[in-house]
Image (spheres, grey):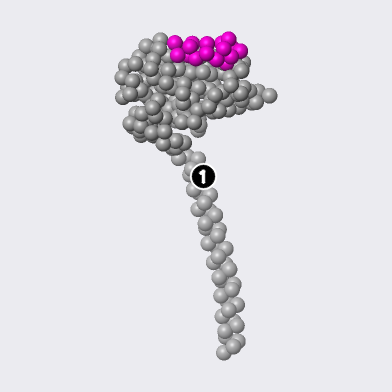
Amino acid sequence: MRKILIFAAILLSIYGCSSTKELESSQKNNLQVNLDGMTNEKIQFELPKLEYSFDSLEPYIDKETMQIHYEKHHQGYLNKFNDALSKVDKKHKTVKDIMKNISIYPESVRNNGGGFYNHSLYWENLSPKSESPENLDIYKEISKKYGSFDNFKKEFSSLALSLFGSGWIWLSIDRNGEIFISITSNQDNPLMNISKQQGIPLLAIDVWEHAYYLKHQNKRGDYISSIWNIINWDVVNKRYLDFINSKK
């Protein structure tokens, strides 16, 4: 009886080990298939998470505007962007690369991809804990370029008010390391290779009416004046330094 039990244990050990190896091999093969499949799947971007609550930017941007802007407008651009990408033979996998090569994409990708990318930058540019940028490198660069930081704010605000219809106002940096202010219509941005002035966005401010109408109605100037109180200059400075360091 004892010999039979020993013999059974040996058989179990042999075949059990074999089965385990087969299972591991099967799982490995399945994993490889899944990984290979991922490279052929349609790219699906996701809505970035806000780092603050909808009411935390009050009184400068009200809670209702924030919630509608983020959950309806931004989400809407994202949904249409993903849908548009599912219908084209994509050549780029990141939003930035798509923007840089936007001329090869259809209008649906340009409009909705721009809306998705621009708003993602916009949320990062805002903060309920905005602090003075005086000790930051970007402050020094802005003051050098425009004579003073106040002069920059005046020129930026004036250009924002001059934009006819809907669009965005930007502070960007070009390939030569020069910062510049520009405006774009609709959902275009300076990263797009169809822009008149091309560069890396540092500061993005939405001047579509949906960004301010509930609080300021048609008074775009009031919206622009108030938004200086909630700019996240640390983010602007980081984008600036990232570009400068990339050229070293």
As for residue 149 lying within the magenta part, the answer is: yes
Q: Is residue 41 left or right of residue 240?
A: left
Residue 22 in percent (x, y) is at 54, 62
- Can residue 75 be seen here? no
Q: Quadrant of residue 164?
A: top left
Residue range of the region highlighted in magenta in the rendering: 142-159
Q: Quarter holding the N terminus? A: bottom right
Q: Quadrant of residue 147?
A: top right
Residue 148 in percent (x, y) is at 57, 12
Residue 58 in percent (x, y) is at 39, 29
In the rendered image, the residue lying farthest to the bottom is 1
- Nearer the observer, 211 or 232: 232
Residue linked to disc 1:
36
As for residue 182 lying within the magenta part, the answer is: no
Q: Quarter holding the C terminus? A: top right
Q: State the residue at coordinates (53%, 22%).
A: 202
Q: Main secondary structure of the magenta part?
A: helix
Q: Is residue 141 left or right of residue 162?
A: right
The amino acid marked with disc number 1 is Asp
In the rendered image, the residue lying farthest to the right is 248
Q: Is residue 74 above or below residue 209?
A: below
- Can residue 135 be seen here? yes
Q: State the residue at coordinates (35%, 32%).
A: 63
Q: State the residue at coordinates (58%, 19%).
A: 139
Q: Quadrant of residue 184?
A: top left
Residue 69 in percent (x, y) is at 36, 29
Q: State the residue at coordinates (52%, 58%).
A: 26
Q: Callout 1: helix, strand or loop?
A: helix
Q: Is residue 33 left or right of residue 247?
A: left
- Nearer the observer, 201 or 87: 201
